[in-house]
Each structure stands twice: as structure tokens, then as C-alpha cells.
Amino acid sequence: MANPKKTSLLRSTVTVSLITLLSRVAGMVREMVGAWALGTSFYADAFALAFSLPNLFRRLTAEGAMSNAFIPVFCAVDKKEGRQRALDFARSFFWALTLLLVVLTALFLWQADFLVSHFFAAGFTGEPLVVTVLLTRVMFGYIILISLAAVAQGVLNSLGVFWVSAITPVWLNLAIISVALGLAGFFENPALPFALGVMVGGLAQLLFQMPILYKRGLRLFKSPWYDPKIKEVFVLIVPTIFGVGIYQINILISNLIATTLGEGSLSALTFSNRLLELVLGVLVVSITTVILPKLSGHFIDGEPALVARQLNRTLKIVAFVTLPVTALTLALSEELVSTLFLRGRFDLVSLMMTSGALRLHILGLVFIAFNRILLTAYQGARRIKITVAISLVVVVVNLLGAYSLSASMGHRGIALASSLSQMVQLLLLWAFVGQLGFGWLWEKRLALSFAKSLAASLVLFGFLVWVRSYLLPWGAAPAFFLASLGGVLVYLSVCALVVHEELQDTLALLFKRRRS
């Protein structure tokens, strides 16, 4: 019989993951439209860099630091002082953050030319630089909209409403697609409609949540406007950016170096990252959305053993999915990129550049996934100094790796450096996990589960390499889909053969849903 608590985690994760999958599919359609309209031209490079600045805050807020800083404080107030007190705190924090973001945005726009040309796009000159500055000015206000939307998501997640945070990105993707296609041909700069779509999408994400928050009891236009608990969140946010947001900070560093490597390097890395984040968004973000309030509650109640159990359960699920995805992507990277992007301005050169980066990016998938899970525990335990110290080491490793490897490998060296830095972060997080209060995390059942997932994934990789040569004459898209379908069957068969616990639990969940 399946463990009821594990089944509950799987059920919550599957629910959020299915909704998130809809968002990520819309996001992939958005990338396909971008590939068709921009390819790996300097317009694509400029848009990728300009969007990475507000997008950094999107990752830090909607999927990282803001939630991990805000949710533990909100949960503590809710549990100790009551629901209404927690909602009043949320209202005060919403307006304090609004003020801070408006000031930050105004300062950035004031110095946009200097900041972009000297720090974020130091390798761009001439028209690419002019276009990048323009797109940055258009999109930077997205920070305000998405950060406030993240606060709303944090409140709803803490109240047990997870589906909203999963579905709101759909509005961003639909807005970008609609505006980009609707205004195509109206501007000399083909990237400008995409930038306008970002702003429309950010507004939609925020407004969509307002009626749901109101129904749950949050009144934004009600005094008082200040709460002493706000300080606790802001104290947590800055170090959390270095912890949860280290992956995005590394992307910014990588983008800066990529601007010196020639046209197409930055956009190729961006397309590759989007494919990597498709899996992270569907699975890992969904899991952290579900477990962070649970972990915070366990720490507040002084139950470290339950935290360890929750982490072990989650890490096994993550390995069960990310290891075969890594194997599949390594074997079929060119077929995957060709199926999704090879059209319009995205040509064969773009294909080779993107698939080359993807093969090295995907090596970091398991490390990134484990890091995000472990960091939720560090944040729940308020072990801020440790995450900051680890993050500083990881930034240095990524910077040195990207700079040195790009000299011989070009943009692919940046992708490899990113994966290596994530491996270093995981090793350091694991080394200090005893600071969370529950001792050593790597129990026998977790090791066995990981070994089974890894063995089945290696068999999967061998199968895909073998079958790929027979399917290629049919075309990239048929080869990818048929090989993937066969690969899934092979992976599940091997898992069944070795009696994999995670496969049994997943089938138990699906069987229970079918009967209910």
C-alpha cells in the first residue's frame, strides 16, 4: 500500500504540475513564435538580454526569493496570531514593496543607458546596443507587476490555493504571443511587439489574482499601511536572492560574457535555457510551491524529523523524473530543437548553436532541481548565512568557469560552466545539511531510489542512441516523438523490473484517481 502522506504530496504536485504544464506549453509556443520572428539575430540577442533583467526578478519573486522570504513569515503570523492578522501583514507588505519597486524602477530607467552599456551588455555596440537599451526601458516596469503578483501568489499558496500560482504565467505567455503576432509588421524593430506583450502579460498576471485574494479576505485598500513584520521579510529577501536566485544570477553573468562571443550566442543560450526551465517549471517549481508551506510549518512546530522525511520523499520524486529527462535530451537534443524551433529566421546555424548549448545545460538539470528543493529547507530553517556563503562560492565558480571555458568552447563553455556551478552548489548544500537540525539526509531508501532511477536512465540513453539512427530518415519531428515514446516505455519497464518504489507510488495515485 502506498504511503498516504507520499500520495498526498504526489497528488498535490501532479495537480499543480498539470496546470503548470499548460503554462509551460504556452511558454514554449511563445518561444517558437520568437524563434520564427527573430531567430538568433541581434534582435533576438537584444530581446533576450533586455528581458533577462526583469525576468531575473520574476524568477526571484514568483519562483524564488520573495516567496521563500515572505511565506515563512506569513505562515508564522497565521499560526501564532491568527488569519486576519496575517492578512493585515500581507496588505502592509504589498504596499511597502510597491513603494520600493517604484523607486527602484525609476532609478534604473534614469540610468538605463549607462547600466546596460557598461554592465549588462558590455559586449554590444552600435545598433544591437541601441535596441537593447530601448527594449530594457520598455520592459523594466514588469518588475513591479510581477513582484506584486508574487506576493499575491505567496498569500494564496500559504492558504492552500496552489493552482493560481501555476496558471498565472499562462496570461503572460498568451499576452506576448497575441501582441507579438498582432503587431508583427507594424514596427521596424521586430522585437518591440514582444516587449510590449511582456508588459500586458505582467498586468494580466496581477489583476487575475485580485478577485481571488478579495474572496479569501485580503483587503488591500484598508489601513494600517505599516507592519513591524515587514522588516523580517526584507531581512530575509537579500540573502535569499543569493541562495534561491543563484541560478538566475549565474544566467546574468553568462549573458554578459555571451555578449562578447558574437551574434547569436546569447539567444542560443536563451533558447537552451528555456527548454531546461520547461522541466524545472513543470516539476520542481510545482513541488516547491506545495512543500514550502509544509516545511515552514514543520520548522515552526519544532519537527525536524518530519522535514527530513518530506525532503527525502521529494528528492526521490525529483530524481525519478529529471534523470530520464536528462538522458532523453542528451540523446535527442538536435531533434528536439529542430522540432520546436527550425522555421522562419531560426536556421541550421541556430539549430547547431542551440542544441550544442542544450546538451551541456541539461547536465545540470538534476543539480538545479535538488538545489531548489534543499534551499526551501534552508529557508524554512532560517539558515541564511550558510546559503549566502555557499552562493558566493558558486558565483565565483560560475564566473571563472564561464570566462575560461568560453575562450575555447564559445557559448557552449558558458552552458557547461553553469552546470558545473550547480553541481558545486549541491555538494556544499549537502555538506552543511546537518545545520538544519535533523542530521544526515542521505538515507538508505533515498540512495536506493536514486540508484534505480539512474540505472533505468542509463538504459534509456542507450536505447535512444541505438534507435535514433533508424528513425532519422523519417524526419526530425517523427524521430523525436517515436523515440521519446519508445524511451518512456523502456524507462518504465526497467523501473518495473527493478521494483522502483516511485513508479509504484505514481501508479497507485493514478489508479486511485481513476477509481474515484
Image (tube, rainbow, N blue to C red):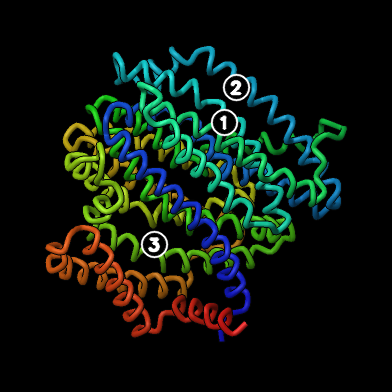
Mark nearer the viewer, 2 or 1: 1
Whether tag 2 and tag 1 are in contact, CB under 8 A, the answer is yes
Tell me the quarter of the image containing the C terminus.
bottom right
Q: What's under tag 1, amino acid-wise?
A: Ile
Of the residues shown, which amino acid type is indicated by label 3? Thr
- Residues at marks 2 and 3 touching, judged by CB atoms closer than 8 Å: no
Q: Look at the numbered disc 3 and give the secondary structure of its residue.
A: helix
> For mark 1, does the 10 Å Cα neighbourhood hold few (<14), some (14 to 19), or many (20 or more) residues?
many
Q: Percent from the top left, x then y, of residue 271?
A: 33, 42
**Residue pointed to by mark 1:** 143
Write down the residue under mark 3: 322
- Between label 1 and label 3, give the one nearer the viewer: 1
Q: Position of residue 3 (x, y in %)?
A: 59, 80
Q: Residue at x 33, y 69 (%)?
A: 454
Dot 1 lies on which element? Answer: helix
CA gap between label 2 and label 1 equals: 9 Å
Instruction: Give the numbered dot on residue 338.
Output: none
Whichever of labels 2 and 1 marks the residue nearer the N terminus, that label is 2
Amino acid on which disc 2 is placed: Leu
Q: Where's residue 278, x and y in %?
A: 42, 52
- Mark 2 and mark 3 lie on one chain; the one further toward the N terminus is 2
Q: CA distance from mark 1 to mark 3?
A: 30 Å
Q: Give the percent coordinates (x, y) of residue 44.
A: 33, 31
On the picture, is 478 further left or further right than 493? left
**Looking at the image, which is closer to me, 100 or 437?**
100
